[in-house]
Amino acid sequence: MITSQDRRYIEDAITNKVATDHLLEAIITTAEISLSYDQILALNTSPVEIVPAPGAGKVIEFVSAILATYFNTAAYTGGDVVSIAIGGGGNSVSSTVSTANCFGAVANRITMLSASGPGPCAEDTALVIKADADFTDPGTAAGTGKVIVTYRIHQV
């Protein structure tokens, strides 16, 4: 939903009266990454960056994400809940997805993660996908994944 402040920034941008940084605050955008076999196995010890750190004086507002998991041959085991977090695996900013509903599933899955409400926010910090424990390969797991994050950047 576009707020009256967003509308004002957009109208000002159309008439070239607003700085680009202010326009960025009014724009909700998306970032998309693919997750490989190796990245899935290491989601706990090596969270994968989705949105890079925006620079000094800026924070990322997480809006939502879609996690698509593509089953291939066998499901991953182990693992734990998967979420979107700030920094290199810091505090989660999203709802969580259970192992059974993502990489541990025996079928393709598409799950929406929503913002988890009031919570941590850190200046100049990336958004990552992480798991609370590493997934394991029972011998024939070969699934992959895709993450699409909706976000916007704010000046602080």
Image: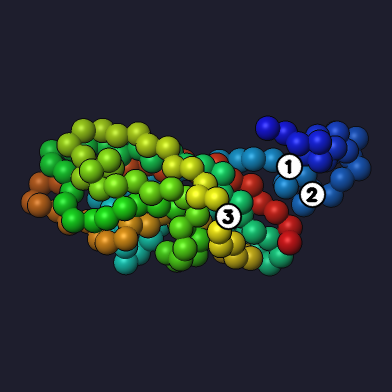
Q: Is residue 28 left or right of residue 112?
A: right
Which residue is rendered at x = 16% and y = 52% of the image? 77
The residues bearing labels 3 and 2 have C-alpha atoms spaced at a distance of 23 Å
Residue flagged by tag 2: what amino acid is it? His
Indicate the quadrant containing the C terminus: top left, top right, bottom left or bottom right.
bottom right
**Helix, strand or loop at mark 3:** loop
Return the x and y of residue 33 as percentages of the image width and height. Answer: 43, 45
Q: Quadrant of residue 68?
A: top left
Badge 2 is on which residue?
22
Indicate the quadrant containing the N terminus: top left, top right, bottom left or bottom right.
top right
The residues bearing labels 1 and 2 have C-alpha atoms spaced at a distance of 7 Å
Badge 1 is on which residue?
26
In the image, farthest residue toward the front: 118
Whether tag 1 and tag 2 are in contact, CB under 8 A, the answer is yes
Earlier residue among tags 3 and 2: 2
Which residue is rendered at x = 35% and y = 34% of the image? 110
Mark nearest the camera among 1 and 3 is: 3
Taking depth in this image into account, of 42 and 5 the one nearest to the observer is 5
The crowding category of the residue bearing disc 1, from other C-alpha atoms within 10 Å (few below 14, some 14 to 19, many at least 20), is some
Mark nearest the camera among 3 and 2 is: 3
15 in relation to 89, above or below: above
Badge 3 is on which residue?
118
Return the x and y of residue 111 as percentages of the image width and height. Answer: 37, 37
Residue flagged by tag 3: what amino acid is it? Pro
Taking depth in this image into account, of 42 and 34 the one nearest to the observer is 42
**Helix, strand or loop at mark 2:** helix
